[in-house]
Amino acid sequence: MLKPLSLYIGLRYTRSKRRNHFISFISLSSMLGIALGVAVLITVLSVMNGFDNAISHQVFSLAREVTLSHYSGRIGQWRALENKIQQAEGVVTTEPFVSGQGMLTHAGIVRPVLAMGILPEAESKLSELENKMITGRLNNLQAGRYGIVLGQALAQRLNVYLGDKVTLVTADANLTPAGVILRSKRFTVVGLFEAGSGFGFDDLWAFIHLKDAQTLFKTGDAVNGFWIKTQSIYKAPLIAHQLIRFLPQNFAVSDWTEDYGAFFQAIHLEKNMMALILLLLVAIAAFNLVAGLVMVVTDKRADIAILRTLGARSRTIMGIFIVQGTVIGLFGTILGVIGGLLLSSHVTEIVNLLEHLLHVQLISSSVYYIDYLPSDIQLTDVSRITLIAFLMSVLATLYPAYRAAHIQPAEALRYE
């Protein structure tokens, strides 16, 4: 016999038909419990990863990674400064901007707005605004034409469409003989974009040409600051800190974490807590494996005693039940990984099918920011779950194996 004795007997115990069917049921339920826990854990973490990625793409399609401004609110002779920023390490591209708060009015409807003056060609390199356009084009913004691009939600609230006129009223005022008059300008809607609900892009942001914004807000040739795109959004805080070091005084640099950092930290915390809670399912299945192996040890007391009288050592007896429990845990983990991967890869279609059959919307963008259930399978998560589940199964075999190794042959054979 070339196989080690503990491995040979352990495998025989695992695949043999036991006289006690209840013990067989306990072992099978332990295997299925581990498989179910692993599958659910992989699926939930994949959904959380998909949700994180979908929200990140929705946010960073328009959100500014790094914003540079001057404490005075204006930057003159800004072209030389822009060239200097573009040469900084980690900076991909920059865009000058002029922005201001105001009110958009149309047919008696008034809505607050954040008007941002941009250069269309630079904006296309900085964000995905061009890809978010649902009607019109970003290049329709031309200097002196006073065109405006609105979010779909804002346009619906104002009841305006492509080609309609809207009035942008700024917070600045002109002093005239007739009194104080708020500065305003008529704009033509030349495009609508849709970035998704939840972050205020569609119902608060409006884009105009940089030259028109300079005229409206009376900044002359100066700009309010620069938006900066970096090589990685996760390096944006570091790059922002580095920019401060070589810029002149009275400059301020902020990054996306100040506006959205708490939100993504909450998502990561929720993912970690869900993983911890669902690991308890695997732990419960492992505890069930302990109970099953203890009952196997009780059922095999006579066999263990005979092996001991034939000269089998304690570690050989322990190895038998460690092998048996490890095989159960291994097969349960493998089944769970296969089931989790299959479920994770089709969870979007499954939820869509349920919504169609039940005629209900389970995922609403007004609550979850997106209207579908995403999934992103990450091999690091799968490997960690597999390793943890298998280790739990191995640890669950130690106590039953210890009990088996300390069975006294004379005591066990007394009533045989």
Image: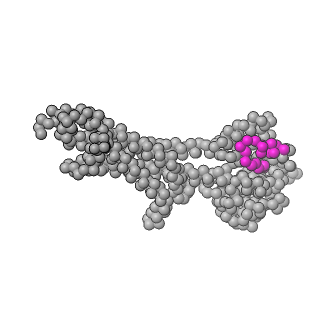
Residue 25 x, y percent position in the rendering: 26, 50
Depth check: give the residue in front, 388 or 141.
Answer: 388
Q: Quadrant of residue 139?
A: bottom right
In depth, the one of 42 and 171 nearer the eye is: 42
Q: Which residues are magenta?
A: 80-100
The answer to whether residue 276 is left or right of residue 59 is: left
Residue 34 as seen in the image, left or right of residue 265: left
Question: Quadrant of the rendered structure where residue 292 is?
Answer: top left
Name of the residue lying farthest toward the front: 1
Left or right for 136, reference 343:
right
- Tell me, what colour scheme is on the image? one colour
Residue at the image position 78 percent from the left and 37 percent from the top: 247
284 is within the stretch colored magenta? no
Residue 276 pos. (x, y %): 44, 42
- Residue reaching furthest right? 177
Q: Quadrant of the N terminus?
A: top left
Position of 325 compared to 83: left or right? Answer: left
- Most foreground residue, 373 or 101: 373
Question: Between 149 and 49, which is closer to the camera in this rendering?
Answer: 49
Q: Is residue 81 magenta?
A: yes
- Could one spot residue 241 in this view of the protein? yes
Look at the image and tell me in which quarter the C terminus lies.
Answer: top left
Q: Position of residue 355 (x, y in %)?
A: 47, 63
Q: How many marks?
A: 0
Residue 387: x and y in percent read 43, 43
Work out whether residue 285 can be spotted.
no
- At 56% from the left and 56% from the top, the residue drawn is 370
Residue drawn at x 67%, y 64% is 134
Going 38% across and 41% down the picture, which residue do you hit? 392
Task: Say if 397 sits above or below 183 in the image.
Answer: above
